[in-house]
């Protein structure tokens, strides 16, 4: 055995360098686009914050919210767009058409705007079975009706065989910002409570299994759904106390929390044991060595609420459609700025970072 | 999850942590190496470090299969992937590992047909589904994954699959441990032994550690309670002045290993005279090649492979990290030039790599309060 070593100042210094680096706007320096740039983690962040935001510099974009807010004749209008390239087109619990409507509607909802109207861009691959197109159009019509939005204009393009995986969809949407709340990713303050609207990881895991790349069978369905009813309930119950709402899609809850912690300059402490994960999702994630916190959702929101409104917000969320399993998962602190810490069920703490690229299964 | 949650029990963890604090001699600093990357991952994931007293330090060993693959072999893999008509299959962890000129992920972006598989059998399935294409599987890992490669090759032979081959990079655990123990700068008091490898080889092969080097070894499971219990067992041996191989992971590890798996490995693989390890250099009889009887399924023989040795980047201290001589943050480039986004060394790539695990999970020193 060796003698006790003195605590090192160097470790602190290195930790400091890493923390500072995290706070800086990422640079886009990659020589080419890889699949990692599309995964919603750090690589996506470098593309957005390192290339797009500086190029298009404007106040609405700088916020990096789920939707941009533009003032039209004195009214705050939320505008959002999303493109859907999911494979397979139909998967347990949903399909590309359902995602295309709910996804954009949810981006508007999480910006605090009731979704009003959508545009639809269809990119179809030569040779695609018309029955598939018909089916997805019917799905979109039904999903839009259920979400209370109209698809008011659109565009169609056909590309050569091999240039698209059957069908790509783009939707853009507008909504009027609700007067009950002012939501912003930079509005979080120490003491704010973090709410999660439901069980996580179902969508990403359903897609991974539906691709059939892993010989794993589990009854996991995508959680795709419209979040407006849940947002509406939150606005009603906690209006002025609401700081920000985010849709935990690509990159999962981990990406959302990290983005918010960074934008607001707060620390976060999350209790892992409180985060609901269905046993099938948890089991599949365990086998593949993935963290459910980093897996995509299509019907789960994270809300940051000032402490005085938290209890009412949670109760309202639980009473709302799609929020029945809502829970308080943690809170904002002061230090270490911009970082998200998780207390594991076992009692130890770790940093919850964003993924760099796609969630990759570990080998053993 | 049944039979898993019990081993993640907070109360049990606290009890073990208390016993560990009592078992370690006051005023001494004990360094225990967990050999396996799976342990490193669990330690960070559950914050096992937080429960240990200040004077018990876990040192992360060379048991991350992704981390020990040298750059030259990654270059060979990329060359294979670029071969016309080849579908190159590999485990997910491998795809971001940098070679001397980019990673497999970048090769994929440049047009190579690279697919992530979860098991070598998935690769064989791809080969059977697409008989016009050559399917190559990038086989890596210790004795943990080697049997599944062996069984896949046996099945390929049995089913007469002609368009499947294996780029074999399997390694064995004992030679690097011996190399580590021979290293003059090593400061370790005991080992938490690799449970998954031991599931195949058994606990017996680790007897040389107490016999030849006088250090205790406890073969351990992967849940946080397993790891704490194993650390406690190592400390007890130290305080009793004993050293032996003990098996904490009895629910899975038979002392003599898995005979069927070992037999399949013997049939399909042969020892290479020497194999290069990232950061550790050449270690004799530490790597496996495909045996002569299965030579027709060896991608290195079927295709032209550059086979150029590439020196580790100068600034990279992966070797010292893997030997437990320095901790990740003591490396000259850790967290500055070498980050998970832009890794220089392999320890920063895989989530099991000591540096990536420390960067991702351990950056928050345990004595700092969250306020």
Image: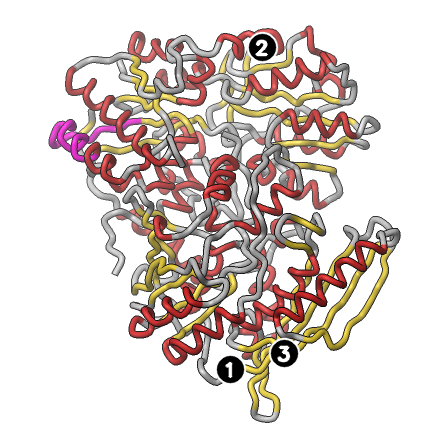
Q: Secondary structure at mark 1?
A: loop
Tell me if I can see residue A54 in this picture. yes
In the image, what residue occupies the spot 66% across and 42% down? Answer: A211
Q: Residue furthest left?
A: B26
In the image, what residue occupies the spot 77% across and 51% down? Answer: A165
The magenta stretch is: B17-32
Q: Does A165 appear above or below A316?
A: above
Residue B264's disc is 2
In the image, what residue occupies the spot 40% across and 22% down? Answer: B195
Alpha carbon of mark 1 to alpha carbon of mark 3: how far?
12 Å
**Residue B159 placement (x, y as % from top left):** 74, 15
Question: In the rendered view of the protein, which quadrant contains the C terminus of chain B?
Answer: bottom left
Residue A116's disc is 3
Q: Left of A285 or right of it: where is B164?
A: right
Q: Chain of mark 2?
A: B
Q: Residues within 10 Å of mark 3 (few under 14, many from 20)?
A: some
């Amino acid at each position: 055995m060796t003698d006790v070593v003195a605590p090192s100042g160097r470790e602190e210094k290195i930790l400091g360098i890493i923390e500072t680096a995290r706070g800086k706007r990422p640079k886009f320096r990659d020589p080419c686009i890889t699949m990692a740039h599309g995964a919603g983690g750090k690589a996506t962040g470098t593309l957005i914050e390192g290339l797009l935001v500086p190029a298009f510099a404007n106040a609405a974009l700088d916020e990096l919210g789920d939707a941009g807010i533009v003032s039209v004749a004195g009214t705050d209008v939320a505008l959002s767009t999303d493109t859907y390239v999911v494979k397979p087109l139909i998967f347990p619990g949903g399909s590309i058409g359902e995602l295309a409507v709910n996804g954009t509607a949810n981006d508007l909802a999480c910006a605090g705007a009731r979704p009003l109207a959508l545009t639809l861009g269809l990119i179809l691959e030569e040779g695609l079975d018309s029955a598939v197109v018909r089916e997805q159009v019917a799905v979109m019509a039904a999903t839009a009706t259920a979400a209370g939005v109209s698809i008011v204009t659109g565009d169609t393009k056909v590309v050569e065989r091999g240039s698209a995986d059957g069908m790509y969809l783009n939707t853009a949407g507008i909504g009027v910002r609700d007067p009950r709340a002012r939501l912003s990713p930079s509005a979080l303050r120490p003491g704010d409570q973090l709410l999660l609207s439901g069980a996580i990881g179902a969508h990403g895991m359903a897609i991974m299994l539906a691709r059939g790349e892993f010989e794993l069978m589990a009854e996991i369905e995508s959680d795709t759904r419209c979040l407006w009813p849940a947002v509406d309930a939150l606005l009603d119950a906690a209006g002025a106390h609401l700081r920000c709402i985010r849709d935990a899609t690509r990159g999962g809850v981990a990406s959302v929390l990290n983005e918010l912690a960074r934008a607001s300059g707060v620390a976060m402490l999350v209790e892992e044991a409180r985060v609901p994960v269905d046993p099938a999702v948890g089991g599949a994630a365990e086998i593949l060595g993935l963290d459910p916190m980093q897996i995509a959702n299509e019907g789960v929101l994270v809300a940051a609420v000032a402490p005085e409104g938290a209890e009412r917000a949670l109760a309202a969320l639980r009473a709302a459609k799609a929020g029945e399993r809502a829970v308080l998962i943690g809170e904002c602190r002061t230090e270490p700025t911009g970082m998200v810490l998780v207390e594991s069920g076992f009692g130890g703490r770790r940093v919850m970072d964003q993924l760099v690229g796609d969630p990759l299964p570990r080998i053993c | 999850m049944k039979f898993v949650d019990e081993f993640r029990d907070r109360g049990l963890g606290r009890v073990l942590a208390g016993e560990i604090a009592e078992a370690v001699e006051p005023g001494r600093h004990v360094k225990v190496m967990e050999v396996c990357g799976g342990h490193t991952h669990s330690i960070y994931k559950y914050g096992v470090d937080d429960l240990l007293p200040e004077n018990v330090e876990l040192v992360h060993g060379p048991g991350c299969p992704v981390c020990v693959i040298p750059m030259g072999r990654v270059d060979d893999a990329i060359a294979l992937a670029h071969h016309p008509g080849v579908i190159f299959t590999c485990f997910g962890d491998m795809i971001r590992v940098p070679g001397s000129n980019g990673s497999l992920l970048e090769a994929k972006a440049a047009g190579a047909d690279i697919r992530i598989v979860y098991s070598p059998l998935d690769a064989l399935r791809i080969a059977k589904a697409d008989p016009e294409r050559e399917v190559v599987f990038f086989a890596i890992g210790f004795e943990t994954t080697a049997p599944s490669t062996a069984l896949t090759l046996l099945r390929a032979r049995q089913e007469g699959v002609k368009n499947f081959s294996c780029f074999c990079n399997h390694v064995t655990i004992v030679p690097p441990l011996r190399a580590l123990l021979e290293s003059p700068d090593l400061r370790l008091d005991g080992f938490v032994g690799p449970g998954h490898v031991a599931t195949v080889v058994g606990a017996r092969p680790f007897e040389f550690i107490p016999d030849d080097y006088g250090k205790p070894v406890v073969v351990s499971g992967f849940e946080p309670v397993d790891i704490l219990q194993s650390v406690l067992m190592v400390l007890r041996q130290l305080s009793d002045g004993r050293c032996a191989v003990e098996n904490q992971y009895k629910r899975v590890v038979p002392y003599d290993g898995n005979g069927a798996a070992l037999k399949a490995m013997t049939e399909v693989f042969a020892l290479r005279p020497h194999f290069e390890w990232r950061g550790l250099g050449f270690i004799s009889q530490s790597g496996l090649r495909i045996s002569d009887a299965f030579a027709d399924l060896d991608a290195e023989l079927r295709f032209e492979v550059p086979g150029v040795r590439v020196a580790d980047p100068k600034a990279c201290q992966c070797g010292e990290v893997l030997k437990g001589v320095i901790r990740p943050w003591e490396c000259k480039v850790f967290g500055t030039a070498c980050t998970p986004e832009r890794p220089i060394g392999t320890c920063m790539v895989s989530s099991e790599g000591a540096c990536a695990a420390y960067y991702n999970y351990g950056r928050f020193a345990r004595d700092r309060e969250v306020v």
